[in-house]
Amino acid sequence: MTTTDLGRVLVCIPTYNEAENVEPIVARVRAAVPEAHVLVVDDASPDGTGEIADKLAIDDPALHVLHRPTKEGLGAAYIAAFGWARDEAYDVVVEMDADGSHQPEELPRLLAALRTADVVLGSRWVDGGEVRNWPVSRRLLSQGGNTYTRLALGVPLRDATGGYRAYRRTVLDVLPLDLVASQGYCFQVDLAWNAWRAGFRVVEVPITFVERVRGQSKMSRAIVAEALWRVTWWAVRSRRARPEGAHPASVGRSARS
């Protein structure tokens, strides 16, 4: 497929100790959507991830590397990436993990859905979505967290915590990113919920999530705890009624490739 009708597309990949994964994930993205550019956002990985990305960028003008001085979490990395994308005048910004759990080969379907939407979420929990190599406990944690989010915030999304998604830059220009303090997977809920509340059209398309095979997961009890208390606090502070004029969120039904 071509992305020319969407404008300039930037795929943002935050990294921390992903030396084994950064080269293959960048190669897969460049093969899946050759027109897109890639931004690796490295939080001073001690394993040399940033240096590997720098070497790859020497031979690929569509690959960029943003070095951050310390590890400050997923949310801060994406906020920095969004600011970079705005400064460089990209029209579409994609979030993607570095570990291969988000398959770049599915990116064309996410971008295709963005033609009639403002935000597209790659969803594990809609019809056609799938998770591979997760234990039952992790599956229940994700499904339970998304169910709680949906009920507490009144947001009609099946997978608000997922990190594989695409935004039109017009959405990021409107959201109060400078006020976003959440980290981890709660950051994803924060942006999806606020985009929906602001009246943007948010859709979900099914993806296959594959648990990483190299490196260590960044999931922790602290991340889960933050998501629980922040969602609860947002629910207490906000009215559940959808703002007048907002579009209903919908679930993507595009055929799998």
Image (spheres, rainbow, N blue to C red):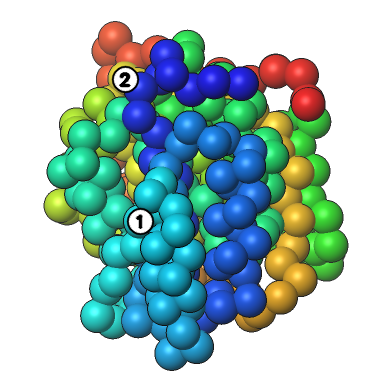
Residue lying furthest bottom: 46
Which of 53/189 is in front? 53
Which of 170/175 is in front? 170
Q: Residue at x 55, y 75 (%)?
A: 18
Per the model, the C-alpha gap separating discs 1 and 2 is 32 Å
The answer, for residue 235, to whether it is visible in the render is no
Provide residue 256's location: percent of width, then percent of height: 78, 25
Q: Looking at the image, tell me whether mark 1 or mark 2 is earlier in sequence order.
A: 1
**Image quarter of residue 205:** top right
Q: Dot 2: within a 10 Å radius of its alpha carbon, few (fewer than 14), some, or many (20 or more) residues?
A: some
Q: Residue at x 21, y 34 (%)?
A: 89
Q: Dot 1: within a 10 Å radius of its alpha carbon, few (fewer than 14), some, or many (20 or more) residues?
A: some
The answer, for residue 26, to whether it is visible in the render is yes
Q: Is residue 103 above or below residue 213?
A: above
Image quarter (top left, top right, bottom left or bottom right) of the C terminus: top right
Please name the amino acid that badge 2 sits on: Gly
Provide residue 30's location: percent of width, then percent of height: 56, 45
Q: Which residue is mark 1?
A: 64
**Residue 136 disc label:** none
Q: Residues at badges 1 and 2 in contact (C-beta under 8 Å)? A: no
